[in-house]
Image (spheres, rainbow, N blue to C red):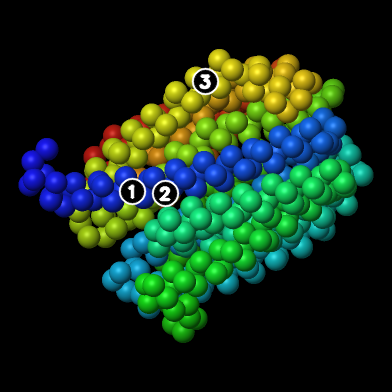
Amino acid sequence: MTAANLLSPSFAAQRALAGTAAWSFLAAAIGRGSNLAAVVICARVLSQEEFGQVALIQSTVGMFGPLAGLGLATTTTKFLAEYRDTDPARAGRILALSLAAAGAAGLLLTGVLILLAPALATYGFAASNLSSQLIQASGLLAFGVFEAVQTGVLTGLEAFPRLARLSVWNGLLSIPSVSFLAYFYGASGAIAGLTLAVILSCLLNAVVLRAECRKWGIRPTFTGANAERGMLFAFSLPSYLSGIIVAPVTWLSSSWLVHQPGGFAEMALFSAADRFRFLLIFLPLAVSRIAVPALSRSRATGDQDGYQNVFRWNLAFGLLATLPAALVCLVLSQPLMALFGEAFRRGWPVLAILALSAIPTVMNTQLGAALLSNGHAWARASADVVLAVVFLGSAWFFVPLWQATGLALSFAISYSTACLMLAIFLRRPHAVR
């Protein structure tokens, strides 16, 4: 490589992107590694049925999360990346409005979850005794939504070294809190530990966010914030619709699973296997987070070459980071499932299918990031609608036949379909520019 190439803006941008990716890799490795360790400990401390109950309660909270999140995490990432340099005052208004909306929506939906807990436990879980635990888990919703928006803001500000350090602290704090409480108080203790971990994460995020705002000269303010409502609404609405379409479908399929014979044990198998899917996708998705602000900035400055470089780099990294690891999980599916306990070994087909489904899951996110950064939020939402419809139909057919394995197959089919749809859309002229 010549000295001219080394000094070129393109090379400098790629080196900066690689450095940022390294921080994201560190955050992903620590964050998901500690999460998996805490879950493995819980699975060994709790009975298989209790572990399945905790997994279903988390899934229920996850269904309400997008309803309360209002699509704000993605929105703040995009707009703070665009305005932090050129218009810090506007970035401050967007930040204040987003955090306030997240707090209000989180509290509102937490109240709704508490009110619906008895009905969800009775009709959704076929276990009315889980109503109190579902109410207890409502704290996961309120603080989880706020944490997601905080992370979206820090991503937009490209505070990736700080995010990596946050992952270290969150991991160090979450493993003992979840494990200790699960050991002494069972499923209720595990839920309390998860909630405590999210609260601590919010507090740490707040400290880092304040420091980043000072660095960029951004001051959160509601003065003139009304002028930003239309822009935020226009971009958040399709992201919001994506979340409220996909999340309830995922929860409904989980409900179908627990209604099968031995349903909570099957849910435990699926949840254990799904932890490895999360581990597979977390690194490329964490690195993909750097693509959204990078793509948004390139688009805002009219740097088409830079936009294309980041787009292709993101796709290539996602595939290379996921495919080899997925194949390893496929080959080692039996011993990996046995980490949760010998009773989990029989769930190896679930892990094998979910490991392969990680590939279209990652591609779905990478392709979607390009659409969102280029203003095609409605196209991204339409792909999620297709994903939800295919997922629902597949789960309705396969879950009664093969239980947890059928649910895993539904994931693979639906995400592959959505990925194909996004790829077709991106081949249209000017879809990525």
Mark 3–mark 1 Cα distance, whole angstroms, equals 27 Å
Q: Where is 96 relative to 189, above or below?
A: below
Q: Position of residue 165 (x, y in %)?
A: 51, 55
Q: Rate crowding at label 2 as few (under 14), some (14 to 19) or many (20 or more) other CA atoms within 10 Å.
A: many
Locate residue 164 relative to residue 82 in the image: left or right: right
Residue under the point 22% across and 60% down? 301
Q: Earlier in the sequence, mark 3 or mark 2?
A: 2
Which residue is at the front of the view, 336 or 241? 336
Q: Label 1 crowding class (10 Å Cα cut-off): few <14, some 14-19, many 20+?
A: some
Determine if residue 32 is in view.
yes
Query: Which of the labelled discs sits on residue 23, or is there none?
Result: 2
Badge 2 marks a residue whose secondary structure is: helix
Q: Position of residue 152 (x, y in %)?
A: 49, 58
Q: In the picture provided, is 370 more to the left or to the right than 253?
A: left
Residue under label 1: 19
Please give the name of the residue rendered at 38% of the width and 45% of the height, measured from the top-left corner: 21
At a point 33% along the width and 48% down the height, the residue shown is: 19
Marks 3/2 in contact by CB < 8 Å: the verdict is no
Mark 1, secondary structure of its residue: helix
| Disc 1 + disc 2, Cβ < 8 Å | yes
Which residue in the rendered view is the most extreme toward the bottom?
223
Identify which amino acid the numbered label 1 is placed on.
Answer: Gly
Residue at image point 45% right, 65% down? 232
- Viewer can see residue 68: no
Disc 3 crowd rating (10 Å Cα; few below 14, some 14-19, many 20+) is few
| Residue type highlighted by circle 3 | Val
Along the viewing direction, whichever of 425 and 362 lies nearer the viewer: 362
Residue 418 percent coordinates (x, y) = 47, 33
Q: Which residue is mark 3?
A: 328
Instruction: Determine which quarter of the picture holds residue 425.
Output: top left
